[in-house]
Image (spheres, rainbow, N blue to C red):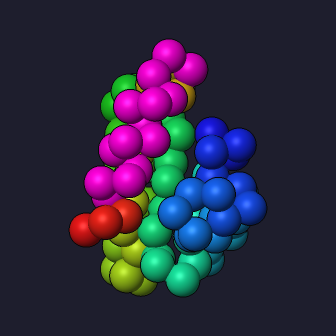
Amino acid sequence: MWNLLRGKQFQGIKFVRQYPIDKYIVDFACRSRKLIIEIDGGQHNENKNIAYDNERTKFLESLGYKIIRFWNNDIDQNIEGVYQKLLEFVKE
């Protein structure tokens, strides 16, 4: 995923990875557009993690961030689809 996002290769938008925002560290962030990309593994389907992710999302959204999430298997098996979805998301 980082190969797709790094160095302004993605539509001229600069992303950073493992970016701290308050008490959280997000996977990828575009600070200028307040966009966060999260990559989730299977543990994010567990009830305790769903609740934590919801709380975290509400907090980050309260700061004005937009969040888009992808599953690990989408990154591994369908990176072109992920790329297309990101293109649509940043055009909005």
Residue at the farthest left position = 92
Horizontal side of 60 relative to 16 (left or right) equals left
Q: Is residue 41 in view from this perspective?
A: no
Q: Where residue 81 sits in the image (x, y, percent)? A: 38, 31
- Can you tell which quarter of the image residue 21 is in? bottom right
- Can you tell which quarter of the image residue 6 is in? bottom right
- Up/down of 68 relative to 40, above or below: below
**Quadrant for the N terminus in the image:** top right
Q: Where residue 23 sits in the image (x, y, percent)? A: 62, 70
Q: Residue at x 74, y 62 (%)?
A: 7
Q: Residue at x 69, y 45 (%)?
A: 2
- Magenta span of residues: 76-89
Total marks placed: 0
Q: Is residue 88 in view from this perspective?
A: yes
Is residue 81 shown in magenta? yes
Main secondary structure of the magenta stretch: helix
Q: Residue at x 50, y 54 (%)?
A: 37
Is residue 28 shown in magenta? no
**Quadrant for the C terminus in the image:** bottom left
- Can you tell which quarter of the image residue 70 is in? top left
Q: Where residue 13 sits in the image (x, y, percent)? A: 56, 69
Horizontal side of 80 relative to 19 (left or right) equals left
